Amino acid sequence: MSRDTWRPKILVAALVGATLGALGLTVASPRAGTTSTPRQLLVSSKAFGRLTAGVAYGAQTFPISVRLTPPDGTWVGAQSRLTAFGKPAFGWVVLAHPGPKPQGLIGIETAYGSTPSVAHILDRLHTAGSGATYGPMTRVTIAGYRGWRIDGDVYSRFGHVFVPFTPRTNGASPPDNIRLERGERFRLMVLDVRGKRLVLFVVSAGLPPAQFPAFLDSARPLLASLRFPA
């Protein structure tokens, strides 16, 4: 098994309460799959698995069924489950271009329990706290499901924290928080998939902000391959 070792950090922590740009991971070689079922994304909070172009992948730990097919061999990915009070709380699918740090990253998150309305999540993402600028909300369609998109960037030297699902609290950051650092650019998308709300984050991560548009272009075919089978 070939391995490219990065500084050890925790994958989910990079999206849940830590800095995407400081992420350090291990990249593991893919396991063989079958032609009748999709390969599973690596189940790990510490590693990405290399993804094979044109091969369908699933995520058995995600709260709803998901499929994706990398259009080329430049992607790595993983799936993970976050628990709270001993019970499954949030599921993640994370995809990236590898490098010394991820060179652009896609995260998909939803809750195992009920999820707030699209309007509520958008309000939480758009208005909670300060430190980020936002463009206008625009319509988006992914996997046949319509939703909303917000583009922006983080300007505060303290970074910015997004909390899509958990109600506002005055205590510690809730487990679904996503922290971005100053200078990071982002695209947030919220979908309603058969009554389950999903949040998709596309972020510059280790890329210079000027290279984010090129990453969005490379991510578009991968996002277009997403499916949420019933």
Image (tube, rainbow, N blue to C red):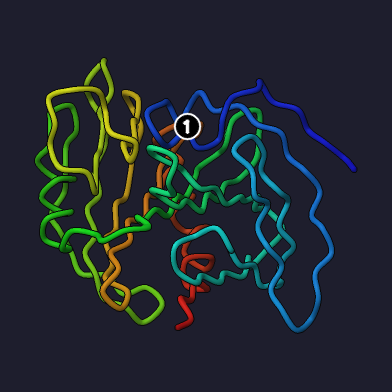
Residue under the point 54% across and 28% down: 23
Viewer-nearest residue: 215 or 139: 139
Residue under the point 71% across and 57% down: 51
Q: Which residue is mark 1?
A: 14
Q: Is residue 191 above or below residue 49?
A: below
Quarter of image, res 56: bottom right
* Callout 1: SS: helix
Q: Residue furthest right?
A: 1
Residue under the point 54% across and 48% down: 80
The quadrant in which the C terminus is found is: bottom left
Classify residue 7 as left or right of residue 148: right
Classify residue 72 as left or right of residue 66: right
Residue 190: x %, y % from top left: 26, 61
Q: Amino acid at mark 1?
A: Ala
Q: Residue furthest top?
A: 157
Q: Label 1: few (<14), some or many (≥20) within 10 Å?
A: many
Residue 194: x %, y % from top left: 30, 78
Q: Is residue 9 above or below residue 145?
A: above
